[in-house]
Image (cartoon, rainbow, N blue to C red):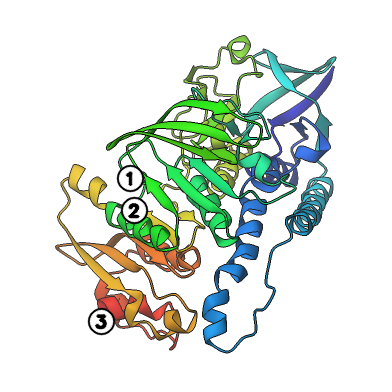
């Protein structure tokens, strides 16, 4: 039986970060992942990295009409899906090699196979039993299945299969208008595919500010994407070259054929094979339950990332990895940060951080909301898209910045200015007294508070 100080289950962003930090602090650490091709987790292999790579590539095609208006010859501008796929694979290999180097340099032992708990201090990986003083569960998430639409990998797919497409479809129904759904709707729309979105709730990007959701819906519809909220898929029939979908909408029943259906209704914690009950670990709806120090009900077993109820974001998992590593090494009780930026890489981009209006109202905090539109931004016009706005929420009494949301050009980059302002407890007046370069998108934040 192999014995370690700490065993980390899962080599996604949270897992490999936690393992390397622990090993650098002198712990004898093992990390368990199903196979070598899964190093990096969902984020690297079938999530954040390939999705943003596809979206970035499609952006050039989406901008061709603007480029033509500026005198750029865009004749024969098109997308070869197989070349894009090969480039994506190359990118993943490069980044995976970097993760492997990081783990080897830290002297982390990598074990391939499916982990499951045998007891509170041991797991089984294949035929091997591995014991440890402490465990960190970082097994990530899986595609959340639709109650009706079963993924077949051909006509009905999840976000994972998008990266394996060998030809561009003529039409796509995206079932689910959350962050992932809107990103892929943008991708397909940019390369000339007819795209519909069917969202079950009353707004797309349901976790975002209502004004932002309305603005995004308006902008996506301008680009030719058809969006139906309060909509439920009730029936489907597969044909040889299409899928007939029946949807119940606010206006009644709708039937339509699509070459491809993309199911994108979120992610579910990947805990089904862990046999948590063998370690007496408590869970709820497959989420591992933890305290504020990220410990399970067993103080020697921690959980981070998508398997717990914190935001299912790679950067959130990185932070949780750091917290857990520190708590294990120093026997301390650090807590994870709670001011986490949320970013969606559709076009236009959406980003938010800190408190939103719903939270502030629920907490009884008096606030002022300031809104500034990119229509007045020279840089936004130069980039060919002046849609969107910034909304800043400030304490009504002292002007301290409490939260903000953005929709528009590169907002996934600029949201961090509001993140820094929140953490520094800056007021809107202090922000107004700073100097922002011109012409930039960033100066719009200054313009709104000066």
Asked whether the residues under the numbered discs 2 and 1 touch, taking CB atoms below 8 Å apart as contact, a structural biologist would say yes
Q: Assign a secondary structure to mark 2.
A: helix
- The spot of residue 364 in percent (x, y) is 15, 46
Judged left or right of residue 50, residue 448 is left
Specify the quadrant of the image occupied by residue 321. Answer: top right
Q: CA distance from mark 1 to mark 3?
A: 32 Å
Asked whether the residues under the numbered discs 3 and 2 touch, taking CB atoms below 8 Å apart as contact, a structural biologist would say no
Whether residue 145 is visible, yes or no, is no
Q: Is residue 81 above or below residue 28?
A: below
Q: Assign a secondary structure to mark 3.
A: loop
Quarter the C terminus occupies: bottom left
Specify the quadrant of the image occupied by residue 262. Answer: top right
- The spot of residue 264 in percent (x, y) is 52, 38
First in sequence, mark 3 or 2: give its number. 2
Q: Nearer the viewer, residue 361 or 103?
A: 361
On the image, numbered disc 2 is attached to which residue?
A: 213
Q: Is residue 69 above or below residue 160?
A: below
Judged left or right of residue 103, residue 315 is left
Name the residue rendered at 39%, 58% in the picture: 221
Check residue 14 in the rendering and tell me which mark sits there, or answer none. none
- The spot of residue 323 in percent (x, y) is 55, 43
On the image, numbered disc 3 is attached to which residue?
A: 450
Q: Nearer the viewer, residue 156 or 323?
A: 156
On the image, numbered disc 1 is attached to which residue?
A: 203
Q: CA distance from mark 3 to mark 2?
A: 27 Å
Whether residue 143 is visible, yes or no, is yes
């Amino acid at each position: 039986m192999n014995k370690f100080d700490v065993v980390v289950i899962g080599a996604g962003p949270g897992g490999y970060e936690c393992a390397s930090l622990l090993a650098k602090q002198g712990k004898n650490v093992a990390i368990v992942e199903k196979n070598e091709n899964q190093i990096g987790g969902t984020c690297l292999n079938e999530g954040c990295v390939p999705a943003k790579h596809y979206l970035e590539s499609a952006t050039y095609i989406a901008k061709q009409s603007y480029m033509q208006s500026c005198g750029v010859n865009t004749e024969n501008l098109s997308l070869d899906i197989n070349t894009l796929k090969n480039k994506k694979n190359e990118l993943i290999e490069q980044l995976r090699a970097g993760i492997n180097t990081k783990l080897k340099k830290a002297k982390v032992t990598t074990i391939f196979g499916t982990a499951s708990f045998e007891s509170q201090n041991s797991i089984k990986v294949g035929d091997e039993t591995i014991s440890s003083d402490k465990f960190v569960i970082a097994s990530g998430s899986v595609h959340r299945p639709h109650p009706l639409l079963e993924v077949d990998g051909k006509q009905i797919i999840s976000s994972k299969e998008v990266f394996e497409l060998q030809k561009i479809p003529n039409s796509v129904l995206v079932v689910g208008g959350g962050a992932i759904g809107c990103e892929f709707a943008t991708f397909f729309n940019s390369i000339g595919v007819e795209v519909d979105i069917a969202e079950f709730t009353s707004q797309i990007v349901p976790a975002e500010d209502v004004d932002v959701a309305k603005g995004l819906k308006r902008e996506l519809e301008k680009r030719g994407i058809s969006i139906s909220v309060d909509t439920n898929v009730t029936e489907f029939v597969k044909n040889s070259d299409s899928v007939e979908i029946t949807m119940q909408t606010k206006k009644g029943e709708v039937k339509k054929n699509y070459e491809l259906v993309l199911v994108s209704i979120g992610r579910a914690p990947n805990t089904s094979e862990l046999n948590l009950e063998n370690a007496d670990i408590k869970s709820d709806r497959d989420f591992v339950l933890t305290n504020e120090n990220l410990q399970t009900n067993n103080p020697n077993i921690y959980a981070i990332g998508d398997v717990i109820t914190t935001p299912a974001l790679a950067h959130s998992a990185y932070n949780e990895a750091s917290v857990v590593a520190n708590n294990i090494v120093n026997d301390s009780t650090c807590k994870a940060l709670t001011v986490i930026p949320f970013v969606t890489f559709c076009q236009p981009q959406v980003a938010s951080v800190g408190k939103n209006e719903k939270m502030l109202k629920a907490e009884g905090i008096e606030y002022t909301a300031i809104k500034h539109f990119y229509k007045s931004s020279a840089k936004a016009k130069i980039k060919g898209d002046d849609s969107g706005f910034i909304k800043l929420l400030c304490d009504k009494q002292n002007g301290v910045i409490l939260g903000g949301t953005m929709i528009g050009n590169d907002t996934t980059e600029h949201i961090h200015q509001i993140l820094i302002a929140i953490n520094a407890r800056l007021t809107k007046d202090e922000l107004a007294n700073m100097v922002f370069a011109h012409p930039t998108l960033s100066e719009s934040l200054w313009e709104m508070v000066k």
